Image (spheres, grey):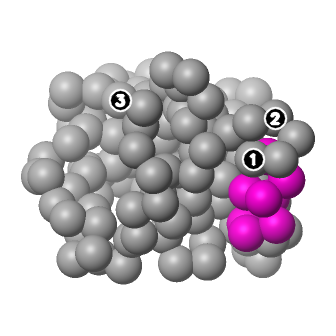
Amino acid sequence: MIPCLSYPDVAEAVAWLESAFGFRERLRIGDHRSQLVFGAGSMVVVADSSSDRPLGHSVMVRVDDVDAIHRRAAEHGASVVEPPTDHAYGERQCTITDPAGHDWIFSQSIADVDPADWGGTIRGSMD
């Protein structure tokens, strides 16, 4: 599971998290997203959205079959924010809101894609 936290300014948040907590930036995606690592764990910093849905936080869960999770959640009345969708960065994802209003992003790797092919910039290693 990967926590995703929103901040008004991704670059500023990354700099502070690196300085204050010792996180290391692994991957920068434009000016709206960054993957940070800390020991064996990771997190994602995302730009705060101007939409009417507050981002605040979400949890990303790596799964083998996004479509199965989507079907199961829909059968149990989940609110689907984003149906299963293939993304240029090699992931198939869906976003579901639970009854308490928490967003869950389920992500399945479908291709090994070089970040340079979709606008990402490798900043460091996972180690």
Residue drawn where x is 11% and y is 52% of the image: 111
Amino acid under label 1?
Glu
Amino acid under label 2?
Phe
27 part of magenta stretch: no
> On the image, numbered disc 2 is attached to which residue?
21
Between the C-alphas of marks 2 and 1, the distance is 6 Å
Amino acid under label 3?
Arg
Q: In this rendering, does residue 37 appear at all?
A: yes
Between the C-alphas of marks 3 and 2, the distance is 25 Å
Q: Position of residue 46 (x, y in %)?
A: 65, 59
Asked if the residue at tag 1 contacts the one at tag 3, i.e. Cβ–Cβ closer than 8 Å, the answer is: no
> On the image, numbered disc 3 is attached to which residue?
62
Q: In this rendering, does residue 97 appear at all?
A: no
Q: What secondary structure predominates along the stretch shown in magenta?
A: helix
> On the image, numbered disc 1 is attached to which residue?
18
Q: Which residues are magenta?
A: 10-17
Nearer to me, 11 or 48: 11
Residue drawn where x is 83% and y is 47% of the image: 19
Q: Residues within 10 Å of mark 3 (few under 14, many from 20)?
A: some
In the structure shown, which secondary structural element does the residue marked by tag 1 occupy?
Answer: helix
Q: Position of residue 59 (x, y in %)?
A: 59, 34
Residue drawn where x is 45% and y is 52% of the image: 124
In the structure shown, which secondary structural element does the residue marked by tag 3 occupy?
Answer: strand
Nearer to me, 74 or 19: 19
